């Protein structure tokens, strides 16, 4: 049955960019270290090839921050690869002051193999193992971040790790089938059954969803938040779509606030009563929303299409600029008439 399920997922759920947006080569001038020649080489970025338990070689990018006290493991959305996500990874690391690792699923970018639900579970496990063994990351320092289809492997891993610092679900899905039909039960052939896993996550969970998402309805995010064991104040971005939330000022403000809050307190998990970490942390810290949401000015130069520059332009308005589609390419999907989560 697992093979049938994976076949369904591969047919309807996965649309890796073709051709990939990047290449990976060994740089002899740096001792044979891997690099992506399409982007400027940086000393704070490692390009990695990781072997999964299912025999695939996946590509990952690790971005270091000198003052980081946490690491974000980022599972991206559909119709994207890490070549397209590279700039966003760098800027999130800078803005949030975290180390960040992003990776391509099997069959995406320059990762080998074919996309499938169970391959993505093996993929994220390989990245997690790398963080533990190569970078010395402890579970208490780790924040899992899943966007759209990436909420599947994120929820799966988070449900198996009891001591994570936090989880972010960005435009998440209840399950694959529920994106298409409002079914009331979980069927064996469904994929990414987040609805059945999110309640097993023991750490604080931040849910971010756009109210105008016409791909994965906002009700997916709201229901997942209701099922969370340790609730954090959700972010419902008014007018936000499926693949443009990073263009809204509230996105980076609330995300940064969440990560800062996680670093200040360690909540006690009660299996029978959902806990609001956000309200507790406000009382303990005595800080106002204005203080925690204040941007930290960063000196490194960024491109004119960067998250920083777009946020600076939009601080006076809650409306986004035209999206550069840095994550899920909706129009590409529509032309293919496939699912776009």
Image (cartoon, rainbow, N blue to C red):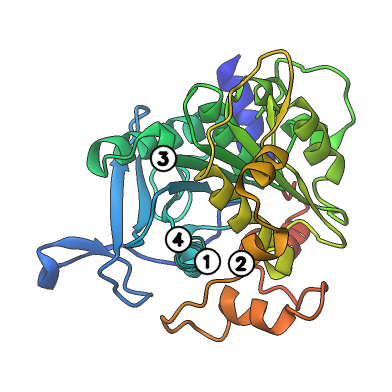
Give me the C-alpha separation between circle 3 and circle 2: 27 Å
Q: Position of residue 146 (x, y in %)?
A: 59, 44
Contact between labelled residues 2 and 1, with CB atoms less than 8 Å apart: yes
The residue under label 4 is 97
Mark 1 and mark 3 lie on one chain; the one further toward the N terminus is 1
Residue 141 shows which numbered tag? 3
SS class, disc 3: helix
Mark 1 or 3: in front is 3
Contact between labelled residues 2 and 3, with CB atoms less than 8 Å apart: no
Mark 1 and mark 2 lie on one chain; the one further toward the N terminus is 1
Mark 3 and mark 2 lie on one chain; the one further toward the N terminus is 3
Mark 3 or 2: in front is 3
Residue 88 shows which numbered tag? 1
Give me the C-alpha separation between circle 4 and circle 2: 21 Å
Specify whether 114 is left or right of 322.
left
Q: How packed is label 4: few (under 14 Cα within 10 Å), some, or many (20 or more)? A: many
Q: Position of residue 258 (x, y in %)?
A: 61, 49
């Amino acid at each position: 049955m697992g093979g049938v399920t994976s076949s369904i997922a591969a047919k309807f759920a996965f649309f890796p960019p073709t051709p990939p947006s990047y290449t990976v080569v060994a740089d002899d001038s740096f001792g044979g270290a891997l690099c992506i020649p399409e982007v400027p080489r940086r000393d704070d970025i490692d390009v990695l090839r990781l072997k999964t338990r299912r025999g695939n070689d996946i590509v990952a990018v690790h971005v270091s921050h000198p003052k980081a006290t946490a690491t974000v493991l980022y599972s991206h959305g559909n119709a994207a690869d890490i070549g397209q996500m590279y700039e966003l990874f760098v800027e999130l690391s800078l803005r949030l002051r975290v180390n960040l690792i992003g990776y391509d699923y099997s069959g995406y970018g320059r990762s080998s193999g074919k996309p499938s639900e169970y391959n993505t579970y093996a993929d994220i496990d390989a990245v997690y193992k790398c963080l533990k063994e190569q970078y010395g990351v402890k579970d208490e320092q780790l924040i899992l971040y899943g966007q759209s289809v990436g909420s599947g492997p994120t929820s799966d891993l988070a449900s198996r790790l009891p001591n994570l610092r936090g989880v972010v679900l960005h435009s998440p899905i209840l399950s694959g089938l529920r994106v298409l039909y409002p079914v009331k039960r979980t069927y064996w052939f469904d994929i990414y059954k987040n609805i059945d896993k999110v309640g097993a996550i023991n750490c604080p969970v931040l849910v971010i969803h756009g109210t105008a998402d016409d791909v994965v309805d906002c009700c997916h995010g709201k229901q997942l938040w209701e099922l969370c064991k340790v609730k954090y104040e959700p972010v419902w971005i008014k007018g936000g779509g499926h693949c443009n939330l990073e263009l809204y000022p509230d996105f980076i403000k609330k995300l940064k606030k969440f990560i800062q809050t996680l670093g200040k307190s360690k909540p006690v998990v009660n299996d029978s009563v959902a806990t609001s970490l956000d309200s507790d942390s406000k009382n303990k810290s005595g800080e106002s929303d204005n203080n925690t949401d204040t941007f930290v000015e960063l000196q490194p130069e960024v491109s004119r299409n960067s998250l920083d520059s777009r946020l600076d332009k939009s601080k006076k308005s809650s409306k986004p600029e035209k999206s550069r589609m840095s994550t899920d390419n909706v129009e590409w999907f529509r032309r293919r008439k496939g699912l776009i989560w």
